[in-house]
Image: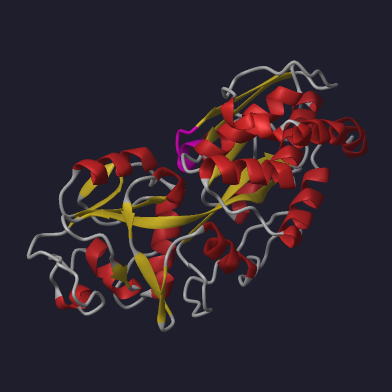
């Protein structure tokens, strides 16, 4: 099955590459005028951080496969994983991988005992966006961020903040931190950063659910709206949703690093794979406490979760073909253009494509 799919799909990717310059203007569910051997509908759900990238991927794939419809619902990572497990969707987008127990557990759309795989296809900084009148530059370290979101640092002119920002007009005003109200892989990545980089200031385990009460909003777009409309507010969100917002630089070693796609990709390249996983289950163990120059450690590695083998052969063919496009250099560049994400490195792409080749 994998060999049959590869023969029919690779020309599709070439056709998409030829029309890549046209993709930014096409609607998500616009059907293309190019036909292929593929047909059918593929439903998916998950990460809101992946939303803009999925829009670009779906648009490009459908333009080159006129009889395929892909519906992606950015309902959040937790919802995507749950829907994939119970069989409501054919694949999920998630900012945190399935657990080792879940990938080998019962999965409604997979054949018995085939299991699932996690594929890192979306890399992006998680930014700390803020709205403080008169402050257009902010530098923070992990301990200070942990204190702000744990509630132990309450005012913007706290010495722990002013010492990092000499000369900045930080007000004597209460800090209003805002977190995600929904279970979120962005929250899991953010709390993982705090737990690893500031273990004494952040006493909580990484989790999809934020562990401290306070102001909350739904999805990355909800966080962005609160920050745009708020006063003395700060929140964490995927960089693709922070357009027009002021964002903080993070202390890494002896320097401060601004969020960028290049700095986010750099931390992935210096981080190992999570131990105890199958060779095709590609979960990255991000080194959040790195002091490597130019690396931005508060990064979102977002996954597409798929079956190794689908109970319905046509669905397996659609998922495999679509993910080939997502992981391709052209697909990664399309996401970078539309979502500001970092294309995965050639070495990581090779591993992802090898795992996708096994999907049937």
Q: Nearer the viewer, residue 359 or 239?
A: 239
Judge left or right: residue 360 versus residue 190.
Answer: right
- The part of the image, by quadrant, that contains residue 317 is top right
Q: Is residue 176 above or below residue 46?
A: below
Q: Nearer the viewer, residue 239 or 19?
A: 19
Going 36% across and 50% down the picture, which residue do you hit? 209
Specify start and end residues of the magenta stretch as a single range. Answer: 74-80
- The part of the image, by quadrant, that contains residue 345 is bottom right
Going 37% across and 66% down the picture, which residue do you hit? 249
Going 13% across and 70% down the picture, which residue do you hit? 157
Q: Position of residue 220 (x, y in %)?
A: 38, 42
Q: Position of residue 189 (x, y in %)?
A: 45, 58
Judge left or right: residue 188 versus residue 319.
Answer: left
Q: Position of residue 103 (x, y in %)?
A: 65, 48
Q: Nearer the viewer, residue 48 or 243?
A: 243
Q: Nearer the viewer, residue 32 or 234?
A: 32
- Residue 77 in the magenta stretch? The answer is yes
Judge left or right: residue 261 versus residue 275.
Answer: left
Residue farthest toward the bottom in the current orientation of the protein: 254
- Residue 41 in the magenta stretch? The answer is no
Q: Inspect this view and state whether residue 358 appears.
A: no
């Amino acid at each position: 099955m994998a060999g049959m799919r590869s023969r029919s799909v690779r020309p599709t990717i070439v056709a998409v590459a030829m029309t890549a310059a046209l993709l930014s203007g096409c609607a998500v569910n616009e059907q293309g005028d190019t036909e292929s051997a593929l047909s059918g509908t593929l439903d998916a759900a998950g990460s809101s951080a992946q939303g803009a990238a999925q829009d670009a991927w779906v648009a490009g794939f459908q333009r080159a496969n006129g009889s395929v419809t892909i519906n992606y619902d950015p309902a959040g990572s937790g919802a995507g994983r749950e829907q994939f497990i119970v069989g409501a969707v054919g694949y999920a987008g998630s900012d945190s991988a399935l657990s080792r127990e879940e990938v080998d557990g019962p999965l409604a759309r997979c054949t018995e005992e085939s299991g699932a795989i996690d594929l890192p296809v979306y890399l992006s900084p998680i930014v700390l966006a803020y709205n403080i009148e008169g402050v257009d530059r902010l530098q923070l370290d992990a301990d200070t961020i942990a204190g702000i979101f744990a509630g132990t640092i309450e005012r913007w002119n706290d010495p722990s903040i002013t010492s990092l920002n000499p000369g900045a007009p930080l007000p004597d005003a209460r800090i209003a931190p805002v977190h995600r109200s929904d279970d979120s892989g962005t929250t899991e990545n953010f709390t993982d950063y705090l737990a690893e980089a500031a273990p004494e200031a952040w006493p909580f385990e990484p989790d999809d659910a934020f562990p401290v009460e306070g102001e909350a909003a739904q999805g990355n777009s909800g966080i962005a709206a609160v920050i745009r409309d708020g006063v003395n507010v700060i929140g964490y969100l995927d960089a693709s949703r922070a357009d027009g917002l002021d964002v903080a630089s993070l202390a890494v070693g002896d320097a401060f690093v601004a969020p960028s796609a290049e700095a986010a990709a750099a931390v992935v390249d210096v981080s190992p794979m999570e131990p105890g996983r199958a060779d095709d289950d590609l979960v990255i163990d991000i080194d959040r406490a790195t002091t490597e120059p130019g690396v931005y450690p508060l990064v979102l590695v977002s996954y597409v979760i798929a079956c190794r083998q689908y109970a319905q052969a046509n669905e397996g063919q659609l998922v495999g073909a679509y993910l080939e496009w997502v992981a391709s250099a052209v697909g990664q560049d399309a996401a970078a253009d539309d979502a500001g994400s970092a294309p995965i490195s050639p070495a990581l792409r090779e591993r992802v494509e090898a795992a996708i080749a096994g999907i049937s």
